[in-house]
Amino acid sequence: MKIAIASGKGGTGKTTIATNLALTLANAGTNVQLLDCDVEEPNCHIFLKPEIESATPVTVPIPKVIEEKCTGCGICAEVCEFSAIAVVKKKVLIFSELCHGCGACSLFCPEDAFIEVPREVGAIEKGYADGITFTQGLLNIGELMSPAVISEVKKSAGDPDVLIIDSPPGTSCPVIEAVKDAEFILLVTEPTPFGLNDLKLAVGMAKALNLPFAVAINRSDIGDDAVAEYCRRENIEIFLEIPNDRRIAEAYSRGEMVVRELPEYLETFKTCWDRIRAFSEKETSSKPDSDGTAKEA
Ligand code: SF4
Ligand code: SF4
């Protein structure tokens, strides 16, 4: 099963939940893999402390002009949606940091004047920790192409019983790339006005992608009831509530795992997992077979 841990904004406890859920499952003997797709700021490794066994660069193809063929017509600059090309005095300038590698300039060039060259934008690292197979993506500083790195992280996934994806925060392209083929999304939030606002955005994203989801509320006993009230009104299930426990904050600040430092929380994460699995099984059984009939539960 492939589940994504996402949130409409950063700092809600997404990584805490992804890593502790992974460790809870691994402790129970489940074959689990964790992908850290928050490639601008991957920090699962701080808590898992994996032994990194391999690192591979991630490249994207960018265009390069064969000057002898170019007539300076300017069509490539006109078709580039990302303002990555300018043609000045018939000379083509390519701003490679802005290039998304879409290939439109090459496709529309009437002189076939482009070739593609690889440009390194980041790396993926693979390792292992405490029964968890781990992969993380790292976007190079100043680069914008996080979806390319996220895509490579996901391609590196094996075939575990449970795949957990720690997605980037927000609801923009990198998040879509991380969660789009998940079977379930756990949306992490906090019971504050900001948390509610960003949860609504994240719910909108999950609905637009037609993906099943539920909510996890971190520091559930601070703030107000507006998030719980919103979930009730919208018929959204809350699968996990983590209280504002000072000991959790202390463990986090030391880079320690909650379920290891405070074993009483193992049951909290296990219950969350049981709910995700039951929800998923229910979804699967209610989906029609190819002949249009519902599957037996
Ligand atoms: S479209 Fe081709 S020929 Fe025209 S300016 Fe661009 S590279 Fe040169
Ligand atoms: S590959 Fe796409 S994004 Fe890059 S320069 Fe060409 S048209 Fe622009």
Image (cartoon, rainbow, N blue to C red):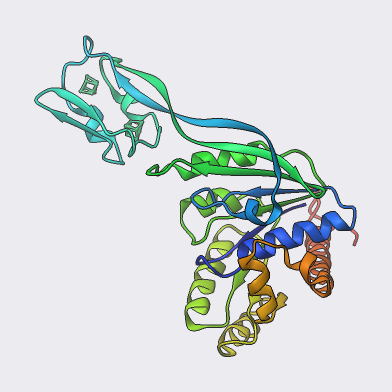
Q: Residue at x 51, y 53 (%)?
A: 41
Is 52 left, or right, of 75 in this rendering? Answer: right
Q: Residue at x 68, y 65 (%)?
A: 17
Nearest to the observer: residue 287 or residue 5: 5
**Hey, which residue is sitting farthest left in the picture?**
89
Nearest to the observer: residue 115 or residue 210: 115
Q: Residue at x 9, y 25 (%)?
A: 89
Above or below — where is 23 with respect to 214?
Answer: above
Q: Residue at x 83, y 58 (%)?
A: 25
Is 28 left, or right, of 48 in this rendering? Answer: right
Is 14 left, or right, of 76 in this rendering? Answer: right
Visible residue check, residue 179: yes
Q: Quadrant of ligand 2?
A: top left
Which percent across, then down, holds residue 95? 27, 34
Nearest to the observer: residue 222 or residue 87: 222
Which percent across, then down, holds residue 93? 21, 28
Which percent across, then down, holds residue 198? 49, 72
**Hey, which residue is sitting farthest bottom in the picture?**
224
Task: Answer with the quarter of the image where residue 256 lies.
Answer: bottom right
Above or below — where is 102 with respect to 219?
Answer: above
Q: Identify the image quadrant of the C terminus.
A: bottom right
Which percent across, then down, holds residue 225? 59, 90
**Hey, which residue is sitting farthest front in the picture?**
254
Count of number-bearing discs: 0
Above or below — where is 214 with respect to 96?
Answer: below
Visible residue check, residue 215: no
Above or below — where is 180 with respect to 194?
Answer: above
